[in-house]
Image (cartoon, rainbow, N blue to C red):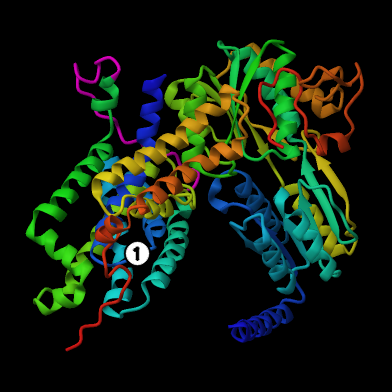
């Protein structure tokens, strides 16, 4: 069996070597996605970025991707396969790909790597992320203004800093309008399971929430909001078609400009590992049109958006207290990026215990 | 509150029940088809496509069932005509189905679907508490129960059902008696495909009216487990599917109540419940052996 595998491996390597040789004059940009490109959410938006590279460089580039790669040992094999396959730059687009990316990068020093949403870098590994929390602060304010129940339901995937940061930003935004605003949280332990996300949405509405917030990738929770005549927010892409009367806005990721820029840098030979954390300011993050809300709510949201984009206001500005009432940031102090990226505590007012 | 929970449980249990009742018949005929997930996802994409193309969810139901049958025919050809290994063919069917469905569905990503309307009988559906639960479901929910009753009657009350069970228990004897083992198994596999297709179609036109790749998210595997859980008896399948659905939904309700139980543990509960019941059932060895189709998974090659 082992011999057979070895044989198959050699055959594959030979085949791949052949393609690499013929494609030497082209720059090859490769992607690893955690979900299917048809999720119409996270992975879909990354793939839009890949298509933007193709559109920008035409036949000077070649792109490839592997979708549905799970965040485990499989990821390492998948990334390594792309590295062997002659990719010049590899974008690994989920938090769980962090350690596999670093591992493979060590073995392939000539290949450039870009890891999304993580915090580990190396000589040939850069990281990039988007300040989703900026959008989440805005929707928090909107939720608190629109909600009659004074309570939102929040569907989340895994207890990683990115998600916790999102919940905190949402609550800070909501509390800036209504200090007693409540949030009910359901962990579905999956980035993508439309059925389970729909069930979670129903459970949250049944328990009295009237606003749906999600940090999972499918349109199912918004569809439930639409069905019940309640409101919610989209995630990753503009989901208005699925909830024409329910979606108030959506936090839209746009990776195109960043991806095109990085591939250009590889072509010019100027690529260096960076720690890029974009957001509303550089349009890596955009808010879908504010709809289905009273005019003053939309206006206030647009104002907050402008303030955050211009750098006039940072959502994580003290005073910020944690659940135990301890002051984490004094009045006027802005939480440093390092703290945000490792956030593992809830702000005051979140009625949930963080799974450790 | 209770009414809301029960309504959600019904939605969660129906796709499992639909897929599992088909697989139960397949396994009763002695064939182990591990491709339920693949057939379900094909049913989901074709159900969605059929709904949008013809503008009615009822066309989607038919398209879903036909799609499930079409891919199950491939499995039947491989395992029954070519006598290939059933486990390998079933796994291949799952992978194939997931891939093909993604390809077919590419153009439908990001398009909202139509939802299968729920039944409304003036007077009955308005009844307090039980009205919506008993008389306000969509047609596939009623169909799932009709299928369970029908399969139960067919397997244990008809001559054809007896032949099917005989084929599953001892294909050599059934063949010697002059029954066409391969024909019976083909029909069973096709029925299983249609049911899995219906289960998938339920996902994309009733549960969450949308199409996204891999939207079955492992439900085909749970349906497979439920058949063993039910020890190949249709009635117990209802218990299993609804128990699984109920624990899934209750854990989602328990979380926002803030009981302080880790969510990972709660997510585990449905599976834990399944394992516990399986252990309890297998305590009675004789009954288990009595119900298990003796030829399950064994390829049939007639010795002439």
Q: Using the rendered view, name the quadrant where residue A302 is placed.
A: top right
Say if the magenta span includes residue B122.
yes
Q: B28 or A159, which lies in front?
A: B28
Q: Residues within 10 Å of mark 1 (few under 14, many from 20)?
A: many
Q: A156 or B120, which lies in front?
A: A156
Q: A182 or A43, which lies in front?
A: A182
Report the residue at 32% width, 51% height from top: B20
Which residue is the site of mark 1? B33
Query: Could you tell me how many numbered marks the image carries?
Result: 1
Question: Do we see residue B64 in this rendering?
Answer: no
Report the residue at 76% width, 77% height from top: A24
Q: Using the rendered view, name the quadrant where residue B132 is placed.
A: top left
Q: For mark 1, give the secondary structure.
A: loop
Counting from the top left corner in percent of width and height, residue A183 is at 63, 21
Q: In the rendered image of this protein, does residue B120 appear above or below residue A196? A: above
Q: In the rendered image of this protein, does residue B58 appear above or below residue A292? A: below
Residue at the bottom extreme, as displayed: B304
Query: Disc 1 sits on a residue from what chain?
Result: B
Report the residue at 71% width, 29% height from top: A135
Q: In the rendered image of this protein, does residue A210 appear above or below residue A118? A: above
Left or right of A342 on screen, residue A67: left
Counting from the top left corner in percent of width and height, residue B234 is at 24, 48
- The chief SS type of the magenta part is loop
Say if the magenta span includes residue A269.
no
Question: Do we see residue A164 in this rendering?
Answer: yes
Counting from the top left corner in percent of width and height, residue B116 is at 31, 36
Left or right of B110 on screen, residue B223: left
Q: Using the rendered view, name the quadrant where residue B186 is placed.
A: bottom left
What range of the chain is rendered magenta?
Answer: B108-129
Left or right of B80 on screen, residue B172: left
Report the residue at 30% width, 32% height from top: B117
């Amino acid at each position: 069996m082992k011999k057979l595998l070895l044989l198959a491996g050699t055959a594959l390597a030979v085949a791949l070597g052949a393609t690499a040789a013929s494609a030497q004059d082209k720059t090859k940009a490769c992607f690893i996605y955690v979900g299917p490109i048809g999720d119409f959410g996270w992975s879909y938006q990354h793939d839009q970025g890949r298509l933007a590279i193709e559109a920008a460089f035409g036949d000077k580039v070649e792109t490839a991707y592997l979708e549905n790669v799970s965040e485990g040992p499989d990821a390492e094999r998948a990334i390594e396969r792309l590295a062997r396959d002659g990719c010049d730059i590899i974008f690994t687009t989920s938090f769980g790909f962090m350690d596999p990316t670093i591992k493979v990068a060590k073995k392939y020093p000539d290949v450039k790597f870009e890891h999304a949403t993580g915090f580990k870098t190396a000589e040939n590994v850069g990281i990039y992320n988007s300040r989703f929390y900026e959008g989440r602060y805005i929707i928090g304010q909107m939720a608190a203004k629109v909600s009659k129940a004074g309570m939102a339901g929040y569907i989340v995937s895994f207890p990683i800093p990115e998600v916790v940061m999102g919940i905190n930003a949402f609550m800070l935004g909501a509390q800036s309008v209504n200090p007693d605003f409540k949030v009910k949280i359901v962990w579905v332990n999956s980035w993508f399971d439309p059925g389970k996300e729909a069930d979670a949405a129903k459970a949250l509405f049944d328990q009295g929430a009237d606003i749906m917030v999600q940090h999972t990738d499918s349109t199912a929770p918004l569809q439930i909001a639409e069905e019940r005549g309640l409101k919610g927010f989209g995630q990753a892409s503009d989901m208005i078609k699925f909830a024409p009367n329910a979606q108030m806005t959506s936090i839209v990721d746009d990776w195109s400009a960043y991806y095109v820029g990085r591939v250009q840098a590889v072509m010019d030979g100027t690529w260096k590992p960076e720690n890029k954390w974009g957001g509303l300011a550089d349009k890596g993050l955009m808010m879908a049109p504010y709809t289905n809300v009273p005019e003053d709510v939309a206006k206030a949201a647009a104002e907050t958006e402008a303030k955050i984009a211009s750098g006039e206001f940072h959502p994580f500005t003290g005073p910020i207290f944690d659940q135990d009432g301890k002051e984490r940031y004094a009045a006027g102090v802005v939480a440093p990026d390092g703290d945000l990226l490792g956030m593992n505590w809830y702000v005051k007012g979140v009625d949930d215990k963080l799974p450790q | 509150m209770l009414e809301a929970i029960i309504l959600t449980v019904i939605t969660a249990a129906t796709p499992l029940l639909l897929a599992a009742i088909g697989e139960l018949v397949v396994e009763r005929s002695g064939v182990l088809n591990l491709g339920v997930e693949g057939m379900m996802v094909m049913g989901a994409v074709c159900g969605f496509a059929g709904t949008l193309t013809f503008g009615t969810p009822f066309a989607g139901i038919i398209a879903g069932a036909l799609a499930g049958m079409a891919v199950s025919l491939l499995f039947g050809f491989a395992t029954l005509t070519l006598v290939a290994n059933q486990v390998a063919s079933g796994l291949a069917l799952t992978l194939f189905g997931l891939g093909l469905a993604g390809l077919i569905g590419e153009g439908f990503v990001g398009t909202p679907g139509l939802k299968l309307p729920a039944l409304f009988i003036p007077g009955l559906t308005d009844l307090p508490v039980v009205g919506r639960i008993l008389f306000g479901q969509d047609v596939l929910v009623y169909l799932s129960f009709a299928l369970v009753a029908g399969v139960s009657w067919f397997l244990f009350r008809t001559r054809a059902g007896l032949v099917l069970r005989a084929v599953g228990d001892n294909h050599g004897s059934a063949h010697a008696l002059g029954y066409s083992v391969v024909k019976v198994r083909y029909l069973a596999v096709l029925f299983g495909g249609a049911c899995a297709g219906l289960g998938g179609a339920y996902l994309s036109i009733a549960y969450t009216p949308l199409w996204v790749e891999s939207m079955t998210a492992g439900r085909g595997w749970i349906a497979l487990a439920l058949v063993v859980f039910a020890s190949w008896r249709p009635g117990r399948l209802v218990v299993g599917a609804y128990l699984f659905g109920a624990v899934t939904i209750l854990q989602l309700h328990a979380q926002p109540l803030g009981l302080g139980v880790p969510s990972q543990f709660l997510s585990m509960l449905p599976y834990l419940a399944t394992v516990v019941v399986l252990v309890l059932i297998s305590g009675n060895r004789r009954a288990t052996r009595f119900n298990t189709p003796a030829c399950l998974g064994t390829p049939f090659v007639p010795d002439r």
